[in-house]
Every structure is written in C-alpha cells, then in structure tokens.
Image (spheres, rainbow, N blue to C red):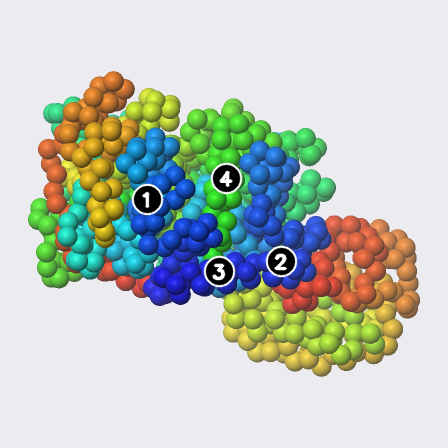
Amino acid sequence: MKRWIGVGLALLLGGAVVVAIVLGGGGNGDEGDAKGLTTVRGVIGSEKKPFFDDPQVQAAFAKHGLRVEVDTAGSRQIATSVDLGKYDFAFPSSVPAAEKIKQDRKAARTFSPFYSPMAIATFEPIADVLTKAGVVHDSGSGYQVLDVKKYLDMVGKGTRWDSLPGNTAYPARKRVLLTTTDVRTSNSAAMYLAITSYVANGDDVVNSSAQTAKVAETISPLFLDQGYSESSSEAPFEDYLAMGAGKTPMVVIYEAQYASHLFAGDGAIRPDMRLLYPSPTVLSKHTLVPFNDNAAEVGRLLQEDPEFARLETRYGFRTADPKVFAGLVASSKAGIPGSLVDVVEPPTYEHLERLISTIEQRYLASGKPSS
Amino acid sequence: MIRFTGRRIAAALLTVLVATTAAACSGDDGQPVAQDGPDVLRVLAGSEVKDLEPLLKEAAGAVGVQVALTYTGTLDGAEMVASGGADGHYDATWFSSNRYLSLIDGAPARLSTQTKVMVSPVLLGLKSSKAHALGWDTKQVTWADIAAAAREKKFTFGMTNPASSNSGFSALVGVTAALSDAGEALDKTQIAAATPKLKEFFSAQTLTAGSSGWLADAYAKQESVDGLINYESVLLGLEGRVKEPLTIIYPSDGVVTADYPLTLLASSAKKDLYGKLATWLRTPDIQRKIMTTTFRRPIVPEVRPDQRFGSAQLVELPFPNRRSAADELISAYLNQVRRPSRTLFVLDTSGSMGGDRIASLKQALSTLTGADTSASGQFSRFRDRETVTLLPFSSHPGVPRTFTVPETSPDPVLREIRSYGDSLVAEGGTAIYDSLRAAYDTVALQPSDGDFTSIVLMTDGENTDGSSYDDFAAYYGTTPKNVRTFVVLFGDSDVEEMGKVAALTGGATFDAREGSLSSAFKEIRGYQ
C-alpha cells in the first residue's frame, strides 16, 4: 500500500512536469521563460497553496526574476514518499519533516520564514461549558487556553458532552473529543500529536522508544475514537465554518487559518466563534529546504524581504518581526494574542514518526483500541 | 523522474483511446458518455447529484468546463476507484461522501484534491398527520424514540439499500451509532450489541430501493409508507409532489451528513479544468442556486442556509474509521436486521437463449449465490432468511422451484441454487405473460407476512406463446398490486412492452443488452 501511495502521488505530481515539457520549459528549473523569469519548483504543504497562488505574491517574485510553481502534498509524504528529485525545494509545515529532508538531501541550510501556533476553533457556548468543567480557563494575557492535561484526563474517562455539569448548550451523547485531521497523513494532526504526547509523557518531549509505546496508550484514542477523520487541514475547518457546532464543536487548526479570515474581514468568523490555544501548544514552523541556489533565493526572500513578510502575514502567518502581525491584528481588531507563553518543542522526526506509526498500527488492528 | 513522466504521458494517450470504449458504457438514461476533449471533465458520480445537471450545463458558458457525468452505485463506484478501474476513464468523482471510499485499501492514493460542494443530512420525513399523531411535530425526537414507535408498529418507512446507495448507508450508520449509545466510532462489538435494537427499528421499513431518487419517485407515486429516511434535500424536494406534506424530523441525538466532495482523480491530467469547476461551484451565486434549486445547504460560510432548513442544531455522529466495521454493519443489516426478501425470478429459457446467453444467465445466477467475492458481490448475494423462487419458462411456464436461505450456514442452499441454475437448458418458445402471471399466482399462494416481495423478469425476446400483455394487464388489475416486477432487458427484448410491464407494476427496467447480465442482476438486488 505504501508503494502505491508513492506511485499515485508521483503520477499526480508528474502532471505539472508534463505540462512544462509540452510548453517547452525544462525540467531542471533553471531555464528562463518568455518573460525572462527563472522557474523554481517546490513541493509544499497544502495550507500554503493560496499564498503561492496569490497574484501579488507571484508579482513580488517576478520583481526578483523568479516564477515559483508549487505542487502540494502532506508534510509526512514530502518527508517520506515524494520524489524530491523533481523539485528545487521542499516546504513542509513542520521542523521535524524539514530536518529529515535536510538530512536526506544533505541541504546546507533551511529557511523558516513564518510560523503558526496550533490553536482550537470553537464556539462561545462550548468554551463556557468547558470552562465550567475546568478544562478551559483564561490565560491572564487576553486569550483563553485549553488545559491539555485536564483534557486528557477527561478523554481518559470517556466523558460525554451530555454528562458535563450545566451543559444545556451542547447536550450531545458523543464523547468530548477535539476534531483533528487524519494523523496518518496530515501535519496539523501530527502537531496536535506533538502537544498531547508531551503532556502524556509527563511534560517532556518524547525522546525514546519506551516512552513512545507508553504514551501511545494514552493518546491513540484521541485520534481513533473520533471515527472517520479527513485528510486535509482545510476540510474540518470548513465544516466548522459552514456547519457550526453540531458537526464540529472544537477543531484543531493552525492559528493562521482562523486569523486569515479575521484579517480579510470576510465575515466567515461569526460573533459566537472563539479561538482558544492549547496549553501547551507547539508552533508549526513552515520550513523551506532549498536544493539549489535559486531555491535558496526563494527562501531568503520569504524570510528577509519586508514585502513578503507583509503578504505572509495577510495569510495569518506570524513572521520574524512580530510588529507586522501585531499591526494587522490591531487594524483588523482581531482578538489574537501578540505572543503565547506556553510553547513546547515537537519531538524529533524519528520519534514523531514512530508515534504516528504506532497509531497507524492500531487503525489496522481489527479490535478496538484501549480506551 | 523520466519514468514517472513517461507513465503520465502514456496515461494521457490512453484517455483519448478509451473515450471510444467508454462510449459503450452508458449513463442510466441510456445516453452514451461524452467523448473526451480538452474542455471535458469526465466525472464518475452517484445518481444523487443528477439534480445538478441543469446547473452544470451553465459551467460550460461560465468557466468553459463541460461536465460529462456517468452514474454508478456507491459500492460499485468505490470499488472501481479503489482498484484503479476509474483511472484514465474519468477525471473526477462526485459521490455524496468519500468516507466509505477512503476506508478501502489503496483508495486514498487514487484521489487528489477534494472540494466539498454542498451539505445534506440524512433525516426522517413523515406524513404530517402521522408526525402529529406521534407528537413529533412539537417536541424533540431521538432515534431511540423513533425505534420505540417502530417496534410498536406505529409507522412505516422507506429507505434505500445501504449497499447500493449512500443515503441508506449514512442512515444505517447514524441509527446504529445512536441506538448503540456509543460515544465513539462504531466497531464490530458495538454493531453486534446494537443488532437487536436495529431489528426493531427496521421492522418498520417496508419499502426499499437501490437509489434515493427512485425511492422518492416510488413514494410520490403511491405514498404506500408513512415516511422516508433520505437526504434532507430529497425530502424538501418532495414538497408539492405529494398529497400530504412531510414533517421533517431532526433527531436530537445526531445525524450523518453528506458533503458531496468533487474529487480530482490522481491519474487525471485535468487539474486546471477541475480547479475551475470546483472554484465556480463554491462562488456565492452558485451556492445560492444550489440551495434554492436542489435544497442542499451551502458549504461556504458567506451563504447562510435559509429558513427552509430549520434552526435545529444537527449533531454529527461519528463515522466508522475502519472498512471492516463499515462492511460488518452492511452485512448485519442485510442478513440479520432488515425484513427478509422474497424474490421470484422469471427466467427465459427459450431456444433463442442458447449458447452465450444461457451461459450469461447461469453466470448471473451464480453471482447472486456468492460466487462474486468482491464487497459489492457479497452484498448482492441471496441473503440469509431470503426465499428465492426460480421460475424458468419457454413455451409454457416451468415448475417454480423455491429455496429458503437459512439464518445461519447459508452455503449449502446457495450451492443448491447455483446447481439448479446450471441445469437450465434453452429450448422452445417464449410465453412471457403466462409465466409472469404464474409468478404472481405463486406469490398469492404464499402469504408474505411483510417480507420485501418482488419479481425479476428476464427475457431475451418477444412474447410468442400464450397470453398477451393486455391479458396480463387485465389480470394484474385483479391482484393486490403490491408486488413490483423488475425487468431485465436482454438480447432482443421488446423494450417498449417491457417498459409497460415495469410501469404497470411500479418496478423498473435494467438494461443488460450491452452490459453484463450479472451487473444488471446485482443492481436489481438493491431494490429487493
């Protein structure tokens, strides 16, 4: 099955290459086109696609003689099964995946132009119910946090929504579980795994096989008991925005997904919607791994050029200079904190991958996992 | 890199070549599939999206995409995509949900971008007088309340077959999740534990169908049941077509919702064309049109559902995340939960059936005895508790032979049916109506006790012996008129007259003249 994923993805990704050949472009990425632009090709996490498709972003690259073409794939796939030989750079959504690629490809350096903390999109009545249950509280710094330790305790007891005291807002029979994407394919779920494994490991980053096995017992049900979960980060957030609390009372997202709607002022975020932060949270650090000089220039522009920083922030990403993000928060009156206190590091690629594999095996087992 | 590029080009060339082959397949309206072309997006779809055809025609003018839809059943479509059978023939899929499909090994790699287009929950619609009598028009109702009323025989309903149609499958998942009282995704243990409650619930199901659209049509024609479990969109769409309006029940313990993801196949080279169509479908104007013309809820937050959709909060029930659980649920429903079927096959064994045709018939019967080991094959076999009567005919009706598949260990009886089928010999004339009448007489002799009773008529030519269609129509008028005949067109069938038989009895015709007889038999199983 793994092999098929590889071939299927390669076929998909090959599409862009065929088009390029038909148009007379080269496959090496360093040949000029009609406008004298140098084409640089990358494989990126899907949540950055709208950014690269933005005409203003394309125009900004053109000023520097570059045209950037991207294909999308899950960060885990970029690190494992995508044929990177066809690309000039990889741009996964997390440091662990980028580190693996850097090692495999012996890349000299990486660029981390922007990042986004993991967050939880929910609704005011739900946040109130969870506050009463002691799982959500005010951080004291202008935003609400979800206490991951208390949340894990609640899940461990199999708590259902309708058993929460004083819950008239959401009396569902189903279990209290954060909605995530499929941890086997999606980076946002892997980042959530990084958070929950840290807490389940006694507030420490998982760094041994023994810890992996033990921690997997506690955190597998967070994923498996949800039932079917979607493969891309956009899908459950879209359900949240369109269908509301009935379908998706709380969903793990990148802060950028929520912030970009607030900054755009498009009305998608309605007055009863709330953004919480898990405590602790992790940062999804979008990290570009260049395989040649042109790609390094793309990375450098994204990281250092103020025009790019401004564009990146519009998509809800935080950049090196916090003032840019803060300025947009202030001008759009978006209630988003300037900085977060309780941030931890994800496990290394090797340990994160081992955790995911352990959970994957439980999907394959026909019996019910421990919960 | 060169290897993959080469492979991609080969696939693209194949597309052009298979367009001719694909023309031999047909949509369910008998129209050949559109030829491939640079502006054509070939979409393998569930029949649920048929009501979007008028809107999709606008896509040609608006964004230059011609959409060629080919319809298939839920499981058949899922199996085709997962096995790679759709690659090269289609660019995209459009089923009411990708959930079952995504659980099949190998399927996720065949799929590329997925774009949700609209939303519709599966709900119960009940005649307003019945809903009022049960008090369900004014208070919150749970699936458990509905199950209790079903057990007490207070109402009847129709639902599609979960193995053929997504609305039936979604309803089955929802009802099981609610009745099992599980807070998490269903597994085998929970399904087994919920089976007795499911039996009570589904004792009220007296109408079945292979597709949501057919179920709604059958209901609108006869209103022979008190309500339907179907998509909200279908239930809302029945307004104005039925004598008595339906009250839509929004169970407070949860529902399963279809989200209609238009999905690019990884093998397709038409990524741009797909992108144009997907983006266009999600523009506010088109979302509003979808809402007002097809009664589905919009997926984009800019367009809010209007007041027709009610204000009830719809709690989504967890959906299984393992294929084994999904298959176990369908199997339990077919073999243990639902009312048993009584099925009569009126089979033409006249001289013209000799050679390949009788061989096809034997194979088709063998398929239904479990010889087809695919999931769709297993779900279309003669079910545990089913009574099967084979009535071969030529110049005269033959002697009907009845088999009852037992509740446990069905294999010996299935083998008997297979060997009986294998013993059929083709010779003589074609006494269609004498034989069909004999089938109805057989039904009359065996009171049904609420089983799903239906007749399949398979003939490869015109009526040559015995009574005429008009004689049969007059006879049919004297029967209770509650047994449908599903007609299989084969060989040189008299298409017009066979259509009349189906219309008279409330059945349908299935065309096996160009496709395989086995496929037609499998498809009919959804209606039995």
Q: How many marks?
A: 4
Q: Which mark is residue A38?
A: 1
Decide which of B376, A330 is in the foreground and name it.
Answer: A330
Point out the image quarter for the C terminus of chain B: bottom right
Q: CA distance from mark 4 to mark 1?
A: 26 Å
Tell me, yes or no, whether the two marked residues, 3 and 2, touch with CB atoms within 8 Å.
no
Q: CA distance from mark 1 to mark 2?
A: 38 Å
Decide which of B24, B454 is in the foreground and name it.
Answer: B24
Tell me, yes or no, whether the two marked residues, 1 and 2, touch with CB atoms within 8 Å.
no
**Quarter-wise, where is residue A301 in the image?**
top left
Decide which of B448, A92 is in the foreground and name it.
Answer: A92
The residue indicated by pointer 4 is B276
The residue indicated by pointer 2 is B19
Q: Which numbered disc, 4 or 1, marks the residue closer to the eye?
A: 1
- Asked if both marks, 4 and 1, belong to the same chain, the answer given is no
**Mark closest to the chain's N terminus, 4 or 3:** 3
Q: Which numbered disc, 4 or 3, marks the residue closer to the eye?
A: 3
Q: CA distance from mark 4 to mark 2?
A: 22 Å
The residue indicated by pointer 3 is B9
